[in-house]
Image: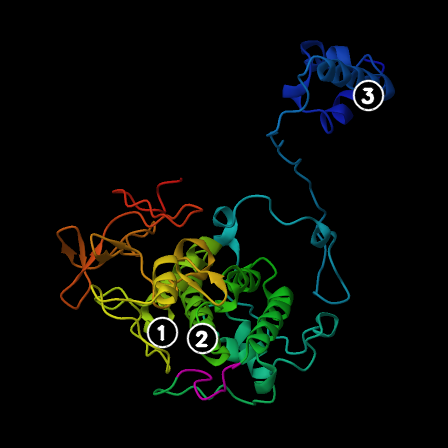
Amino acid sequence: MLPYPTTWRLISSIWPMEDRPDEMKDPLIVGTMDFKTALDFKRHHEELLAKQGKGDSVFGKDNDLPAKNFAAGSDNCNNILHEVRWERMPVSELKEYWKQIPPKRTHIYRRLPLEHHGAAGAVGECVIIRAHDRTLPLKICMFSKANSLKKSLGASETKGAADNWENPKAITDIMDALLNLNAVFFCLWHMDPTPSLLMRLVVYYNYAIYGDRSEKERARLIVEVIDAILRENSSRAIARDPPLSFRQCKERWKDIAERWGDFGGQGSSGMSTAPNKGKREPEKAGGRMSGPEKQRIGDGRGGNGPARFGNRSGTQARGRALRYLNNPICYKYNRATGCDRPRKTGGCDDGRGGIYAHVCNYENQQGVACHQQHCAETWRH
């Protein structure tokens, strides 16, 4: 019998097998050492590797976490809590385990502990009840404090839930509503990252600050994007599919922003279709433009500096469109999902008799577009 039979098991939890010398992969050898001796051997081996320039690799391999058995016990989510609750979240991707998460909570609990989150009294009871079922679409206005006293969602055959509720009109109100949504999900669906992804999305696109949009206009765009994502996630919950990823959320932002002429939608000329709100319009292609107008169109610069589609705006700056052979570049083509418009020679039909060019819209640091025959999403520059 080995003098130290537990040393092999203990050292295995801190020293991956692939990092050991051959002799330390033999349980008979390790079992003859006490735990301190085994640790000293590990330390000396790592020091020797460091001297030889063979230290830790930049990319390490994770070992499988050990399985753990739990005794059966009661849990009422309140004053009787099973010890399994204190274990970590799954380390695998959501798609690997999401189908095991129920789409709805069977038992309704209205008085969620929101005080610690700073959200006490900020979300109405009817909204909390609805949030117990992930298959029911939510809207960001439901989590706005301005609507916290609503007693009913008011859904009918002709109107959806909360259709007559007031949407947030300021960016700070939207972020506050997202934090309230996050607090409710923390209590009901802590494995669902949707609230944090929505906040990350708004920050990623810099709160839709580009061009000279008013805050009210930016808020309308953000609300529409958030509601569309929440609506799609409810549909995915019915099929037991995981919620949209951050990458997919970015695609939804771009799709909606592209439909908004005032937020980067392209007319047949590739220019914004929105009115210029009293500002001098640049002359049509082929006419003369002043120096400042050339700079705004050619460089995409306004009062807030560069604003390019390929960076963080999510849409092109107003008055500027990336072009190829005098045709605006198709931004749907430049996503992994591809373009669904009717095809035309050199690209797709813009719906107005023109063409959106199917070329790469990736811009380098100097603002020069790639223009090659591949999409920016699948070609990594």
Q: Which residue is mark 2?
A: 213
Say which amino acid is labelled 1.
Answer: Asp
Q: Which residue is mark 1?
A: 262
Residue 139 place in picture, x, y as percent: 48, 76
User: Which mark is first along the chain, 2 or 3?
Assistant: 3
Depth check, front residue: 34 or 71: 34
Task: Look at 51% across and 70% down and name the residue there.
Answer: 133
Task: Look at 49% across and 46% down and name the residue there.
Answer: 96
Task: Look at 32% across and 79% down and name the residue there.
Answer: 275
Q: Is residue 325 above or below residue 16?
A: below
Q: Which residue is mark 3?
A: 39
Q: Is residue 164 above or below residue 326?
A: below
Alpha-carbon neighbours of circle 1 within 10 Å: few (<14), some, or many (≥20)? many
Dot 1: what SS?
A: helix
Residue 7 place in picture, x, y as percent: 80, 21
Marks 3/1: CA distance?
A: 65 Å
Q: Is residue 197 magenta?
A: no
Q: Which residues are magenta?
A: 160-169
